[in-house]
Image: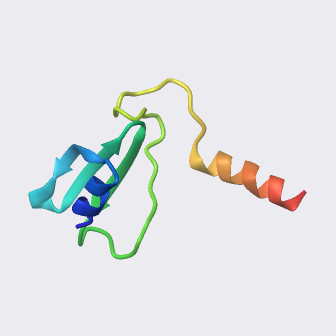
Amino acid sequence: MSKAFYETLGFTLFGGQLEKNYIIMKNGNSLVGLFQDIFENTIITFNPGWDENANPIDKFDNARTIQKHLNLKTLN
């Protein structure tokens, strides 16, 4: 895994299970999930409805809404 790389950037272990090939690392408000041999391809995921501490939040924009907003901006 890239755990050592992210540690050099100041990330620390936040969650997950190394023995099950996944960990979550945190640096300030930034989270990175590292998964080895779990997904077939490289992917980006989002956890809408959670804050950076995995606590539920009431209001949030989902990724598809943000994508539509960004696509409209690039067309104008």
Picture quadrant where residue 52 is located: top left
State the residue lying farthest toward the bottom.
40
Q: Is residue 48 depicted above or below 2 in this figure? A: above
Q: Is residue 22 left or right of residue 47?
A: left
Q: Tell me what residue is drawn at x 40 percent, y 28 percent.
A: 56
Q: How many marks?
A: 0
Is 68 or 32 nearer to us in this picture? Answer: 32
Residue 46, percent from left and from top: 46, 49
Identify the colour scheme used.
rainbow
Position of residue 39 measured from the top left corner of the image (x, y, whole percent): 32, 70
Q: Establish if 16 lies above or below 55.
A: below
The residue positioned 22% from the left and 44% from the top of the image is 15
Classify residue 62 as left or right of residue 57.
right
Q: Residue at x 76, y 57 (%)?
A: 71
Outermost residue to the right: 76
Spot occupied by residue 53 in the image (x, y as percentages of width and height) = 34, 32
Q: Quadrant of residue 51?
A: top left
The residue shown at (58%, 49%) is: 63
Please state, as top left, top right, bottom left or bottom right, where the N terminus lies in the image.
bottom left
Toward the top, the furthest residue is: 58
Q: Is residue 57 above or below residue 70?
A: above
Foreground residue among 23 and 68 = 23
Relative side of 8 to 41, left or right: left
Q: Quadrant of the C terminus?
A: bottom right
